[in-house]
Amino acid sequence: MSGPTSVPAQSTIDTPTGGVEISGVTKFYGEATAVDRLSLSIRPGEFLSLLGPSGCGKTTTLRMIAGFEHPDEGDIRLSGRSVLGLPPHKREVNTVFQAYALFPHMTVAENVAYGLQQRKVPKAEQRERVAEALDMVQLRRFADRRPTQLSGGQQQRIALSRALINRPSVLLLDEPLAALDRQLREEMQLELKLLQARLGTTFVFVTHDQSEALSMSDRIAVMRAGRIEQLAAPADVYAEPASAYVASFIGQQNFLHGTALGGDAVDTYAGTVHGRWGGEQTAPGAAVVASIRPEFVRLAPAGTADGPGIDGTVLGVSHLGETLQVAVEVGREQAFLVRIPAPGAPAVAVGDAVRCTWTPSDVRIFAGDGIPETATHVIALPKEAA
């Protein structure tokens, strides 16, 4: 007679590898709350970016996934299994940092093979996997060089190769491109996205650079004060920000502070502005802000355009390659930005009297708080301050 059938503690057979589940995670540093009851589900094979300014909790979140920090509350699961208490080397993750952390006394091949050596992988298999990992980043021909003989971009690719050689389910990247110049950063953004798509590995990418997040991510988690302010695809975060904070952090904005009049109307320095609500609608009389992206603003000589808008004087004109950016003084030393395609742009010069106009459907209205001081934005005065 057979004994009682044992029930496994937890089956993970139907859980795809590479998924990350963060459930109600909180992390304190003394009396400061770095991460506040954060919950986030990262899909297997997804490229997800944690985006936000310094101190928002994004790096702390990444370090808790990696095992370098431990949550005070909540749970973290990798591929369906809780990793609470597991040290970094026992998690199916690898981390790439801003500092490449390559060993200068080792060759490129030796640096890449280091993780395999620690795991006692046979020499023949090491050689094969090192060659494969270097081929992934197109640097096999540099296998016998020292890291100091490589450029910054090449060193970062070696760091990526070393992180990927152990075939992690999740690759964590903590601002890995921050030390590169602009051209190299843009090249590496494309290479990273192509590499991730080819490998199908889950990438969790931490950055404060909106252009990096927008160009590479499947989804972006915009973080604020240890929480997620908005989680969505890049196009949705850009076009449909959930709050003034998100609107100010993703791209530039013209903000018109004012008072809600009810419905879709706001009383501002530019008169009554109509738009669509982003987030929860406030009651009439509440302080609100209307936001308009520079690329949604049209420019015309003063007195030649009707419809919603604001009059001003051209302060400056900047050529940004494919676009022309015009700063317009709209009163009390407040500026309004207009960005128009350079080909066929109207002739405009400093001192010209102009009118900035827009379509109400391109205006978003938010509650009047939540704009970070570090955001790239232009603020026009409330009506009563004029």
Image (tube, rainbow, N blue to C red):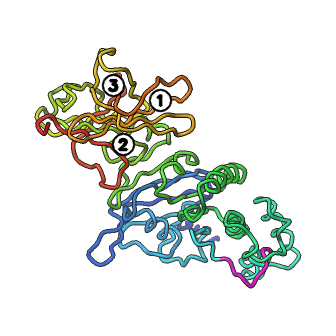
Give how far apart the Cα atoms at labels 1 and 3 are: 14 Å
**Image mark for residue 247:** 2
Report the residue that reaches farthest toward the right.
124
Please name whichever residue, 340 or 188, is drawn nearer the observer in this view of the structure.
340
Say which residue label 1 marks. 340
Give how far apart the Cα atoms at labels 2 and 1 are: 20 Å
The residue type indicated by label 3 comes to Val
Relative height, residue 1 to residue 250 (above, below): below
Q: Please report whichever mark, 2 or 3, sits nearer to the chain's N-terminal start.
A: 2
The residue type indicated by label 2 comes to Ala
Viewer-nearest of discs 1 and 3? 3
* Residue 332 included in the magenta stretch of the image: no
Contact between labelled residues 3 and 1, with CB atoms less than 8 Å apart: no
Q: Secondary structure at mark 3?
A: strand
The residue type indicated by label 1 comes to Ile
Q: Quadrant of residue 368?
A: top left
* Drawn side of residue 246 relative to residue 87, left or right: left
Viewer-nearest of discs 2 and 1? 1
Q: Give residue 13's position: percent from left, percent from top.
A: 62, 58
Say which residue label 3 marks. 354
Q: Please report whichever mark, 2 or 1, sits nearer to the chain's N-terminal start.
A: 2
Please name whichever residue, 295 or 139, is drawn nearer the observer in this view of the structure.
295
Q: Can the viewer see residue 72 in this picture?
A: yes
Q: Quadrant of residue 88?
A: bottom right
